[in-house]
Image (tube, grey):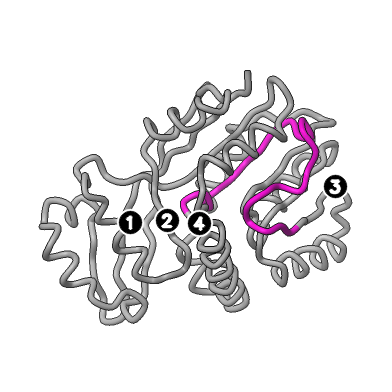
């Protein structure tokens, strides 16, 4: 079991190193300045807090967090070693002294118990192969009263057979599963994290057709009601998908 998880993590690492290295298309998929601003205004950060950005990637959330909260310490954690090194160089060149980046094996967090006041994560957790273990690790490193902010897309309510997960797994980039709000409440609750607040948003992103071979058969098999719920549109080379996004705040007991 653990060997399969490690193999999957290696596939994900290689995929994302390549995507971050040629960032233009990936940025089109994930970047949204309006959403970023809403997150930054939603989470409450006080001077002296230690904050972990889990699945930080290129630091899309970590950099503005550090820049807007110079009295706090921000750490970005990810498996993408080359990208994290580029982030370190950028932080040094921009003189951002309260921002650091740490790599790990994708399983156990390299931090002591009760190390952080807050964990934030955006568009990352659907790639985590053992979500219960990862949420347990989040709870372990959070201080009592600390908070977890999750931003991640969710499956449409009518998508009972999880067409969207099956579609994105075709890419073999480490996608595991999108979770509903109810599933997050259950998973986090098992680890002493209680929901406190949240808001909904949407993401519309492209997929290159040549990365999802056989998607037509998959769409036909699941039917127009399900595929239509994601407002899917095609160009000559891309498929556009719209999903709702959970933005959920949990507090550790």
The residue that appears at 64% across and 39% down in the rendered structure is 137
Q: Mark 1 and mark 2 in contact (Cβ < 8 Å)? A: yes
Which circle marks residue 165 in the picture?
Answer: 1
Circle 4 is placed at which residue position? Answer: 1
On the image, the x and y values in percent for residue 2 come to 56, 57
Q: Give the range drawn in magenta.
A: 103-126
Circle 3 is placed at which residue position? Answer: 98
Which circle marks residue 126 in the picture?
Answer: none
Q: Which of marks 4 and 3 is in front?
A: 4
Q: In this view, does 139 lie above or below 15?
A: above
Q: Nearer the viewer, mark 2 or mark 4?
A: 4
Q: State the CA–CA distance, disc 3 to disc 1.
A: 37 Å
Q: What element carries label 2?
A: loop
Location of the C terminus (image quadrant): top right
Q: Is mark 3 on a helix, strand or loop?
A: loop
On the image, the x and y values in percent for residue 33 come to 54, 52
Residue neighbourhood size for the residue with mark 2, other residues' Cα within 10 Å, grouped as few (<14), some (14–19), many (≥20): some
The residue that appears at 42% across and 70% down in the rendered structure is 172
Q: In this view, does 193 lie above or below 99?
A: above
Q: Which of marks 1 and 4 is in front?
A: 4
Circle 2 is placed at which residue position? Answer: 176
145 is within the stretch colored magenta: no
Q: State the CA–CA distance, disc 1 to disc 4.
A: 21 Å
Q: 85 and 35: which one is in front? A: 85
Q: 6 and 160: which one is in front? A: 6
Q: 131 and 246: which one is in front? A: 131
The residue that appears at 60% across and 36% down in the rendered structure is 136
């Amino acid at each position: 079991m653990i060997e399969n998880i490690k193999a999957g993590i290696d596939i994900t690492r290689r995929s994302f190193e390549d995507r971050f290295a040629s960032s233009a298309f990936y940025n089109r998929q994930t970047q949204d300045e309006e959403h970023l601003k809403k997150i930054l205004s939603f989470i409450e950060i006080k001077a002296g807090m230690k904050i972990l950005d889990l699945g930080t990637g290129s630091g899309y959330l970590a950099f503005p967090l550090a820049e807007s909260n110079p009295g706090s310490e921000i750490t970005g954690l990810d498996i993408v070693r080359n990208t994290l090194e580029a982030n370190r160089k950028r932080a040094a060149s921009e003189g951002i002294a309260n921002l650091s980046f740490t790599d790990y094996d994708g399983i156990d967090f390299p931090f002591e118990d009760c190390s952080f006041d807050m964990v934030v994560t955006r568009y990352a957790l659907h790639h985590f192969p053992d979500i219960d273990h990862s949420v347990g690790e989040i709870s372990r490193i959070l201080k009592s009263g600390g908070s977890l902010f999750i931003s991640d897309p969710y499956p449409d309510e009518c998508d009972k057979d999880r067409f969207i997960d099956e579609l994105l797994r075709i890419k073999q980039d480490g996608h595991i599963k999108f979770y509903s709000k109810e599933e997050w409440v259950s998973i986090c609750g098992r680890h002493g994290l209680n929901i406190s607040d949240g808001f909904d948003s949407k993401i519309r992103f492209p997929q290159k057709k040549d990365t999802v071979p056989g998607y037509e058969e998959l769409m036909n098999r699941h039917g127009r009601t399900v595929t239509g719920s994601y407002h899917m549109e095609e160009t000559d080379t891309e498929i556009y998908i719209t999903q709702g996004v959970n933005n959920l705040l949990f507090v550790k007991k």
